[in-house]
Image: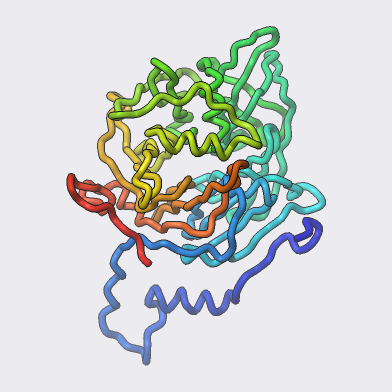
């Protein structure tokens, strides 16, 4: 599809969808019945087929309506799906600003307003309304007044009046050491400022951060960063605010070190994914309500594929407070927490280039990730939960 035509492709009839919504919620009743309302449907996990295949589905965000957005930097698209997997629209970048994005990568949402923040390249961000319409483009220079430089920005998480928060990888003039810290990016594009609380990063840790945007999550007034360990070093969660940086070493059994010899490149991503899927590793961090979850991937039996678990972490001890096994054996997953349900995007990794495609998603009740009796908790000798169909 040309980027210069119909940046929005609507799907279906709004009147029919509105009528179905009214019938579903019981706002319309047959023959004016005044009897008791029907019982609420049982909370189940559903596997839905996406209305279209998405190539390189990098950004994922559940909206307040329950729909979800998927960003593809390779396609240059934003696509909105409803909770049944139906494609509601697909948008390409416009010719003129502010909506002239080309490769949207990450999406996050301001929970207070529903506004969206879309990360494109290292120094390009887009602000969009809750319907996904871009209203402002934010670009800024690499250098700060203090003489630092951005080496990489992994994600943008929250709009706070005139600023956004981001994890920035920084280096100073004449210094070879790479450090990370919380950066505040001014929405008016006038620049950015780094904070005093920074920490050093190794090359493998930088590589793991660049694999996906899931290694950073908003936490209280700052960010939580998942840092992988190599060799004798520990995997850890790093909590960073303007004033402090605190390490929480993970106490999770049988985690492997990240392979320090792993080399990432366009022609080797398939081989890198195959090597990583043979190891039990922490591969993502997510926040919901007051809890931080670490995503752990383990090799599964040939018939079941990869094993994916979300572990709520005690931030004093680094231990897992529970273990929620996701009902998928996908090569890779994308996860976004919503108010009523979470979306787990199932991804396939193909070929030597490691091309990633998605055609299905899981719609999981949100309280399943907070209940001690959750169907996702697998007892010894028990079977993991399944999704319908």
Measured as percent of width and height from the top left, residue 306 is found at 39, 45
In the depicted view, which residue is nearer to us: 158 or 180?
Answer: 180
Q: How many marks?
A: 0
**The N terminus - image quarter:** bottom right
**Residue extending furthest bottom?**
31
* Occupied quadrant, residue 182: top right
The one of 220 and 247 positioned closer to us in this rendering: 247
| Above or below: residue 328 compared with residue 354 | below
The image shows residue 242 at horizontal and vertical percentages of 51, 22
Residue located farthest toward the left when viewing the structure as drawn: 380
Residue 58 in view, yes or no: yes
Q: Residue at (35%, 56%) from the top-left corner?
A: 365
x, y percent for residue 82: 51, 63
Asked which quadrant contains residue 42, the reply is bottom left
Q: Is residue 278 above or below residue 6?
A: above
Q: Residue at x 35, y 49 (%)?
A: 326
Please report the residue visible at 62 percent of the width from the left and 70 percent of the height from the top: 11
Instruction: Residue 116: tell me if it is visible.
Output: no
- What residue is rendered at 54% in x and 15% in y? 196
Q: Quadrant of the C terminus?
A: bottom left
Position of residue 175 in the picture relative to residue 296 (left or right): right
Residue 153 in the figure: left or right of residue 244: right
The image's colour scheme reads rainbow
């Amino acid at each position: 599809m040309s980027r210069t035509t119909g940046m929005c492709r609507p799907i279906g009839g709004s009147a029919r969808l509105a009528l179905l919504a009214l019938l579903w919620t019981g706002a319309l009743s047959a023959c004016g019945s005044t009897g008791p309302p029907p019982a609420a449907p049982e909370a189940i996990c559903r596997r839905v087929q996406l209305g279209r295949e998405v190539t390189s589905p990098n950004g994922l965000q559940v909206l307040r309506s329950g729909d979800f957005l998927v960003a593809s930097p390779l396609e240059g698209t934003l696509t909105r799906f409803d909770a049944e997997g139906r494609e509601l629209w697909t948008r390409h970048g416009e010719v003129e600003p502010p909506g002239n994005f080309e490769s949207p990568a990450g999406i996050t949402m301001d929970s207070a307003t529903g506004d969206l923040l879309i990360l494109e390249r290292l120094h390009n961000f887009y602000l969009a309304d809750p319907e996904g319409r871009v209203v402002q483009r934010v670009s800024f220079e690499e250098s700060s007044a203090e003489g630092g430089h951005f080496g990489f920005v992994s994600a943008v998480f929250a709009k706070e009046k005139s600023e956004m928060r981001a994890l920035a990888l920084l280096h100073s003039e004449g210094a070879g050491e790479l450090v990370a810290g919380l950066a505040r990016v001014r929405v008016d594009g006038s620049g950015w400022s780094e904070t005093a609380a920074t920490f050093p990063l190794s090359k493998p840790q930088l590589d793991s951060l660049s694999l996906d945007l899931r290694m950073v999550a908003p936490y209280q007034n700052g960010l939580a960063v998942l840092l992988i360990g190599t060799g004798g070093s520990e995997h850890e969660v790093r909590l960073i605010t303007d004033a402090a940086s605190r390490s929480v070493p993970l106490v999770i059994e049988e985690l492997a070190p990240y392979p320090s010899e792993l080399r990432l490149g366009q022609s080797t991503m398939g081989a890198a994914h195959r090597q990583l899927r043979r190891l039990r590793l922490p591969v993502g961090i997510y926040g919901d309500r007051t809890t931080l979850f670490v995503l752990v991937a383990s090799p599964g039996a040939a018939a079941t594929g990869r094993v994916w678990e979300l572990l709520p972490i005690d931030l004093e001890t680094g231990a897992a407070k529970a273990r929620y096994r996701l009902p998928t054996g996908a090569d890779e997953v994308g996860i976004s927490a919503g108010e009523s349900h979470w979306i787990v995007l199932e991804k396939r990794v193909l070929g030597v280039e490691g091309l990633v495609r998605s055609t299905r998603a899981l719609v999981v009740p949100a309280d399943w990730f907070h209940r001690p009796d959750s169907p996702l908790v697998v007892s010894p000798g028990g079977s993991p939960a399944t999704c319908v169909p």
